[in-house]
Image (cartoon, helix red, strand yellow):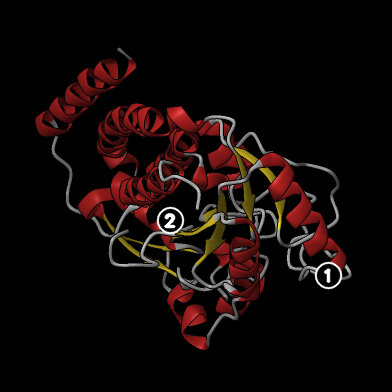
């Protein structure tokens, strides 16, 4: 019913836009990730020109910005970031760009994490002595598809502030997307429903939001702390947990070495699956919805196979 209501409201908004047409605009928006770029495109449509900085198939915590990133920020009207410890490099880039609108607190600076109910908030420290910190909150919140409601909300508000004449168009685009998203979430929940509570191991702590949304149970991680490689004693602990809990699947990402996952698989018979955490990392994932289509299919397929 919520999806139908959103569609009706979107149609009414589109009717208002048609009745009072506005001149075409092209706002230049830079996002820190391809996932945010996908959502800005959904909301902004042909009224925005969007580019992203971080490479989608690379470990975001080891990403090093380039000179060209500063250059594209100089002429941007809006910058959109994940926030927390995910893209700490952005403030240095915006300062180097000299673009006053994109400085922290400026009219063109959007930190999406400010509207998300965060998981794993433990401290305010952003400078761990080793590895990288999730203490201010786990930053992988875009991997809960329903967080796209709040994410597109703050994006639409930011675009409307710069381009108020198109505010109805931005909101109509958003509501059409959310109606489709609601149907897709129901589909993904049906696919993963048989595997609720099945114990899993993940390489990095990237998927607590995905796990919460679909009631998956990640019991441990190959990294004892984010960014820290496993010690022999930690591997022994993982093997014991996997055998005791009958873990059927180990999750890794594209940029992570499969050496340890394969070792765990060989010792326990668990399958190793590679999930994609960002739009554009592989050709099969060109946008936000396809990110979940792909990951849900991969997970459901692996969990549905008999353990070797």
Decide: few, some or many residues near mark 1? Use Cα within 10 Å; few <14, some 14-19, many ≥20.
Answer: few
Q: Is residue 126 visible?
A: no
In which image quadrant can residue 264 be found? bottom right
Task: Name the one closer to the observer, 31 or 268.
Answer: 268
Taking depth in this image into account, of 53 and 226 the one nearest to the observer is 226
Residue identifier under label 2: 35
Q: Secondary structure at mark 1?
A: loop
Element type at mark 2: helix
Q: Residue furthest top?
A: 1
Residue in view at x 44 percent, y 33 percent: 149
**Residue 105: percent from left, percent from top:** 64, 53
Q: Is residue 115 left or right of residue 280?
A: right
Task: Describe residue 69's horizontal placement relative to residue 91 as left or right.
Answer: left
223 versus 217 height, above or below: below
Q: Residue at x 39, y 51 (%)?
A: 298
Residue 297: numbered disc: none
- The quarter in which the N terminus is drawn is top left
Q: Work out whether 231 lies above or below 64.
A: above
- Residue 146 position, x and y percent, is 46, 33
Q: Please identify the quarter of the rendering in which residue 192 is found.
A: top left
Classify 10 Å Cα crowding around label 2: few (below 14), some (14-19), many (20 and above).
many
* Farthest-out residue, left: 19
- Work out whether mark 1 precedes mark 2 in sequence or the reverse, and give the earlier one: 2
Q: Going by the image, does 58 lie left or right of 286?
A: right
Residue toward you, 221 or 271: 271
Disc 1 and disc 2 in contact, CB within 8 angstroms: no
Which percent across, then down, holds residue 212?
59, 33
Q: Which residue is mark 1?
A: 231
Q: Residue at x 59, y 76 (%)?
A: 63
Is 302 placed left or right of 25 in the picture? right
In the rendering, at what x and y percent does residue 104 appear?
65, 58
Mark toward the viewer: 1 or 2: 1
């Amino acid at each position: 019913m919520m999806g139908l209501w959103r569609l009706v409201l979107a149609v009414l908004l589109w009717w208002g836009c048609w009745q009072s047409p506005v001149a075409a605009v092209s706002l230049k928006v830079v996002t820190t990730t391809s996932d945010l770029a996908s959502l800005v495109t959904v909301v902004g449509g042909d009224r925005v020109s969007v580019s992203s900085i971080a490479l989608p198939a690379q470990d975001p915590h080891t990403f090093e910005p380039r000179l060209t990133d500063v250059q594209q920020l100089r002429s941007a009207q809006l910058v959109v970031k994940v926030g927390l410890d995910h893209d700490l490099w952005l403030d240095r880039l915006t300062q180097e760009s000299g673009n006053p609108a994109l400085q922290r607190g400026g009219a063109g600076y959007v930190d999406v994490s400010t509207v998300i109910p965060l998981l794993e908030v433990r401290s305010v420290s952003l400078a761990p002595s080793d590895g990288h910190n999730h203490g201010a909150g786990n930053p992988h919140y875009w991997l809960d598809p329903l967080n796209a409601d709040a994410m597109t909300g703050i994006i639409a508000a930011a675009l409307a502030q710069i381009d108020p004449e198109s505010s109805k168009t931005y909101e109509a685009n958003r509501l059409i997307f959310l109606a489709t998203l609601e149907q897709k979430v129901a589909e993904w929940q049906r696919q993963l429903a048989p595997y609720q509570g099945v114990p899993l191991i993940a390489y990095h702590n990237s998927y607590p939001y995905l796990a919460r949304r679909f009631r998956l149970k990640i019991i441990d991680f190959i990294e004892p702390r984010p960014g820290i490689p496993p010690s022999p004693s930690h591997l022994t602990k993982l093997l014991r947990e996997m055998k005791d809990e009958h873990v059927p699947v180990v999750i890794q990402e594209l940029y992570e070495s499969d050496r340890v996952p394969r070792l765990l698989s060989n010792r326990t018979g668990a399958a190793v699956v590679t999930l994609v955490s960002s739009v554009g990392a592989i050709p099969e994932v060109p946008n936000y919805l396809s990110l979940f289509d792909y990951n849900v299919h991969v997970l459901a397929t692996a969990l549905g196979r008999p353990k070797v």
